[in-house]
Image (spheres, rainbow, N blue to C red):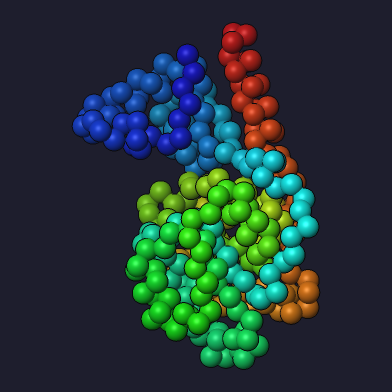
């Protein structure tokens, strides 16, 4: 038997009592031939429960989604987010940083564009208004996945927003891999010791700023802006192809072959 888990306590077990939950969880972990999870942090947490075997298989990106295109990059200095933004993902640190930078840098005020593609909760829009960023905001509702990929590939900078929740260190969203493969620099907001932070450093795909670190946010945005003005703003992502779903499926297939052979 193999059990594939994405982190316990979620949809699978959330409907039963905590005591039964822990008992069932431990039984599954103990009896499974292999536990598979999608982030290093969650693998480490599951390893503490003493499974027979545990393996990491990343969510990855679909190579068909990142076919080379003739799309032109945005002419503005665009900060682009694809997907919904709720209160837990509201990047207030970015709004604060931009508010301060716009007062100090006249060049930024002439070409900044904040593009939010997908649903945006009212609290996020309220904060954008509070920090006087409405004039730079472009809202786009729901788009097909194909069209959203186009926005990604045209962006100057892609914003990756991690939920500000207790499990944030182990969050590795599918969007992260898509961003990395789009070859546009990523500005992530989240814990600087998280799995995403480590992968950003490993691949050179972008920078991460902690939830409350306004000064670092300002520094990173200015660094990207200066490169934009010089026409040199690009992603230096390397060796990201190992995170394609094709590559990750090979890992999964190897695990299954090994288990079945035994």
Compared to residue 203, the image places residue 101 above or below, namely below
Q: Residue 83: x, y in percent?
A: 49, 55
Q: Which residue occupies the extreme top position in the image? A: 262
Q: Residue at x 47, y 14 (%)?
A: 1
Q: Nearer the viewer, residue 228 or 55?
A: 228
Q: How many marks?
A: 0
Residue 79 location, quadrant: bottom right
Q: Residue at x 77, y 50 (%)?
A: 68
Q: Residue 13: x, y in percent?
A: 31, 31
Q: Is residue 144 left or right of residue 122?
A: right
Quadrant where the C terminus sits is: top right
Q: Nearer the viewer, residue 152 or 207?
A: 152
Q: Is residue 105 left or right of residue 127?
A: right
Residue 206: tell me if it is visible: no
Q: Residue 103: x, y in percent?
A: 53, 90
Residue 135: tell me if it is visible: yes
Residue 179 location, quadrant: bottom right
Q: Residue at x 45, y 57 (%)?
A: 84
Compared to residue 22, the image places residue 257 above or below, namely above
Q: Residue 152: x, y in percent?
A: 63, 58
Compared to residue 104, the image places residue 216 above or below, namely above
């Amino acid at each position: 038997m193999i059990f594939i888990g994405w982190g316990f306590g979620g949809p699978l077990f959330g409907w039963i009592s905590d005591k039964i939950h822990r008992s069932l969880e431990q039984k599954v972990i103990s009896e499974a031939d292999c536990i598979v999870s999608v982030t290093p942090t969650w693998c480490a947490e599951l390893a503490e429960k003493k499974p027979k075997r545990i393996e990491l298989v990343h969510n990855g990106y679909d190579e068909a989604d990142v076919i080379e295109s003739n799309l032109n990059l945005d002419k503005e200095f665009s900060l682009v987010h694809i997907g919904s933004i709720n209160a837990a993902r509201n990047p207030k640190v970015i709004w604060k940083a931009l508010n301060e930078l716009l007062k100090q840098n006249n060049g930024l005020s002439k070409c900044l564009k904040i593009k939010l593609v997908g649903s945006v909760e009212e609290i996020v829009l309220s904060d954008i208004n509070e920090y006087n960023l409405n004039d730079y905001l472009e809202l786009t509702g729901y788009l097909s996945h194909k069209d959203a990929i186009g926005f990604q590939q045209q962006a100057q900078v892609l914003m990756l927003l991690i939920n500000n929740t207790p499990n944030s260190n182990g969050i590795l969203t599918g969007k992260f891999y898509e961003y990395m493969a789009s070859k546009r620099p990523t500005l992530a907001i989240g814990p600087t010791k998280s799995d995403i932070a480590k992968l950003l450093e490993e691949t050179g795909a972008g920078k991460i700023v902690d939830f409350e670190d306004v000064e670092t946010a300002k520094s990173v945005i200015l660094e990207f802006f200066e490169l934009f003005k010089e026409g040199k703003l690009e992603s230096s992502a390397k060796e990201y192809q190992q995170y394609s779903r094709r590559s990750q499926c090979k890992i999964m297939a190897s695990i299954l072959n090994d288990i079945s052979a035994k």
